Image (spheres, rainbow, N blue to C red):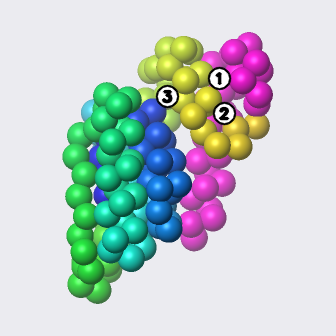
Amino acid sequence: MIETVGLPGLIAAADAAAKAADVKVVRYEGVDAGIVTVYVIGDVSSVQAAVAAGAAVARQVGQLRHFHVIPGPDESVHRLIRKLLNTRGSTQAKGSDDQELEQKSIAEIRKIARTIPNFPLSPQEITLAKKDELIRHIQTLKKEGSEQDK
């Protein structure tokens, strides 16, 4: 797991982690004060490499809060995480992330949009887009991503 403050660090960390090793980014969770956590799964060495790479990138963005690898967690831990994510993460993360985006400046939102792989707008279109349009695209991509996790 990699914990950051704000979405730019989380997106950068998740992207770096997914590219660094054979892992799957399974979910993210948002809590108060803009703290967000991304979870990756895979074999122990791959997860260690991915989390290290993701943490390094998040640190460069300046928003790393914490990172940790649990090698071979017990099945009861897996069940606990799934339960927590299904009950708390699904509802709380959406509301806090939407609110967080609304509070950001247009420049910050454009920066986030440029870091998202397969963003539907070109860099030039992102530069010209209005805040509400960018937020709508980001929310749509997050919704599509969470539906693929199911």
Which label sits on residue 136? 2
Front residue of 28 and 22: 22
**Relative to 138, 44 lies left or right:** left
Give the crowd class for mark 3: few <14, some 14-19, many >=20 residues within 10 Å.
many
Identify which amino acid the numbered label 1 is placed on.
Asp
Q: Is residue 133 visible?
A: yes
Identify which amino acid the numbered label 3 is placed on.
Leu
Front residue of 131 and 23: 23
Front residue of 5 and 144: 5
Indicate whether 51 appears above or below 95.
below
SS under mark 3: helix
Residue at mark 3 to residue at mark 2: CA–CA distance: 10 Å
Which label sits on residue 150? none
Which label sits on residue 132? 1
> Pointer 3: what residue?
101
Tell me, yes or no, whether the highlighted magenta stretch contains residue 83: no
First of labels 1, 3 by sequence position: 3
The percent coordinates of residue 53 (x first, y second) are 38, 50
Say which residue appears at 49% left-offset and 28% top-offset.
101
Which quadrant would residue 50 be assigned to in this image? bottom left
Say which residue appears at 32% left-offset and 53% top-offset.
52
Give the crowd class for mark 2: few <14, some 14-19, many >=20 residues within 10 Å.
few
Say which residue appears at 50% left-offset and 20% top-offset.
108
Residue at mark 1 to residue at mark 2: CA–CA distance: 6 Å
First of labels 3, 2 by sequence position: 3
In the image, the segment drawn in magenta is 121-150
